[in-house]
Amino acid sequence: MIWNEAKECMSRDEILNMQGVRLKKTVKRVYHNVEFYRKKMQQMGLEPGDIRGIEDLNKLPFTTKEDLRENYPFGLFAVPQSEVVRVHASSGTTGKATVVGYTRKDIDIWQECVTRVLAMSGIGANDKIQVAYGYGLFTGGLGLHYGAENLGATVIPMSVGNTKRLITMMEDFEATAIACTPSYLLHIAETLEEMGKVDKIKLKAAICGAEPWTENMRREIEAKLNLKAYDIYGLSEILGPGVAADCDAHNGLHVYEDHFVPEVINPDTLETCKEGEVGELVFTTITKEALPLFRYRTKDLTSISYDPCECGRTIARISRFKGRSDDMLIIRGVNVFPSQVEAALLEMGETSPHYILIVDRVNNLDILEIQVEVAEHFFSDEIRKLEGLTKKISHVLQTALGLAVKVTLVEPKTIARSEGKAKRVIDKRKLL
Amino acid sequence: MIQQLSIFVQNEVGSVAKVTAILKSNNINLRAIASFDTPEFAILRIVVDQPERAKAVLTEGGFAVTVSEAIAVELEDKPGVLHDLLQVIADAGFGVNYIYSIVIRSGKVPLIILNTDNLEGSKSVLKEKGYSVAEQEDVVL
């Protein structure tokens, strides 16, 4: 169902007008309250009054993750600390963590957005949802939690770390929905198969996000668990989960444009891309109080469409992600995204979807090795068939990537399953 | 026909020992074993007294396992007998995929295990020529 028809089905003119009004207000507030943006705007000779509507958005400066790190922890907050009711922080894999804050109103908007996502996935007050994202500083757990409560659903706050217990409760409580990463859901599906319990569960919908995944992975999850899987997108800097999500049409993710204005830019020239052209996704928040951001560069690669969707929503849609501009591997001059490997393997359908890319440099030549687990139902008694399979995988990947690939078959369950973001790449070159 | 288990193992230190450890802890008795290697991985083929149970515990232990059929033929212990047997199969126009070890059975003649591209046909021609082809229960006892 459409939770907030007034906001999700506006005409394009109504959307642009609303965005213009909200942007002007945000720019004024930020200019007066955030030294970082005031200085940037002064350097550019830009005054709040220069932003007269949404068409002036591209006059504003960009913001990057580095800007957040340099102003660690609260330097970009636009409200006094007394108005901040919660903080979250992203995992600091490189350097300091990125800290984000929320006012009471920010939290309300966040849960409204997540509620819209859940309603779009067919979830309602009669559903019992297991939230199996991490609870804590990560936005996934609490973000889904409050959105589901706001919807009136029964929340089972599982967090992560104990798959057997999750399955016991899934069965005993007759959970009808689950929210977790797609790779973790595949792990749950495998465990259910091992326990012979797939028929015992009542799940009808899964809300998956926090890592890139493919249409093929969606189909595999849906077939294994007999449910509908939806894609939810978000990033803590902008909100957390609930910035965008897909509907039954699975034809792009709807962006809640009454709160976040999306743009797609060419990451090299920083020029705005045309509708449909792939580039880096950029967001400007227009209702956030604690941490409003101008033109935040997500590094996620996508394209945008303003055509109304068959579901009735008129808000902009971003296409399924083509990868991130920063997890892109360059191997012998060829751009490689782990998602391409996954798509090719699943398309081929003769291996398990568990793989890892190992990039190494031998004699100044980059070597790409892909380890793939042998799935029991594809394991042949004959060595020549296994060698044939290895050759076929190499060929399929070589075609998909435009790069010679060394394929190694490995034993089942030897590639680490992750309960958070799946680790798909070991780049040994960085260690040199 | 007898049942054999084929197990995918990576070519690394201790990989076969991982398999035998599982068999030992489940008290499964090995009757024959052979490994066929390639640079990256190996297929370990085994004949055991409880094939279904062995498959279950090995799968649980994280191995890819298939159960397939193979021919087990009784052979006298004297020169030339294996050649005579292979000639029968060759004359019938069947190809041998692999042959492996001998099942030890107390007080009985040894068995040779082979896989061909036509198992039923090979079994028939061997029987016609008077060979004794063993069944699973002959291996277990």
Image (tube, coloured by chain):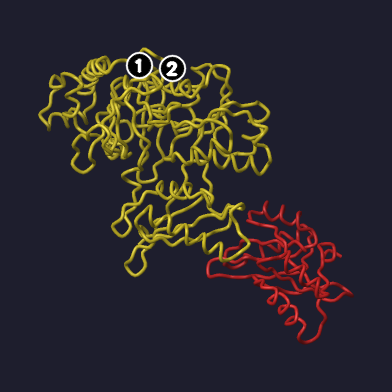
Q: Are marks 1 and 2 in contact (CB under 8 Å)?
A: yes
Q: Chain of mark 1?
A: A
Q: Quadrant of residue A315?
A: top left
Residue A13: percent from the left, percent from the top?
24, 16
Which one is in front, B95 or A91?
A: B95
Mark 1 highlights which residue? A9
Image colour assigned to chain A:
yellow
Residue at the left extreme of this rendering? A45
Of labels 1 and 2, earlier in sequence is: 2
The relative height of residue A267 versus residue A239 in the rendered view (above or below) is below
Residue drawn where x is 72% and y is 66% of the image: B121
Image colour assigned to chain B:
red
Which one is in front, B128 or A385?
A: B128
Circle 1: is it few (<14), some (14-19), or many (20+) Cα within 10 Å? some
Circle 2: is it few (<14), some (14-19), or many (20+) Cα within 10 Å? some
Residue drawn where x is 61% and y is 53% of the image: A376
Q: Left of A202 or right of it: where is A108? A: left
Amino acid type of the residue tagged 1 in the rendering: Cys
Residue at the top extreme of this rendering? A6
Q: Marks 1 and 2: same chain?
A: yes
The relative height of residue A414 versus residue A115 in the rendered view (above or below) is below
Residue A178: percent from the left, percent from the top?
55, 30
Mark 2 highlights which residue? A2
Residue drawn where x is 59% and y is 70% of the image: B37
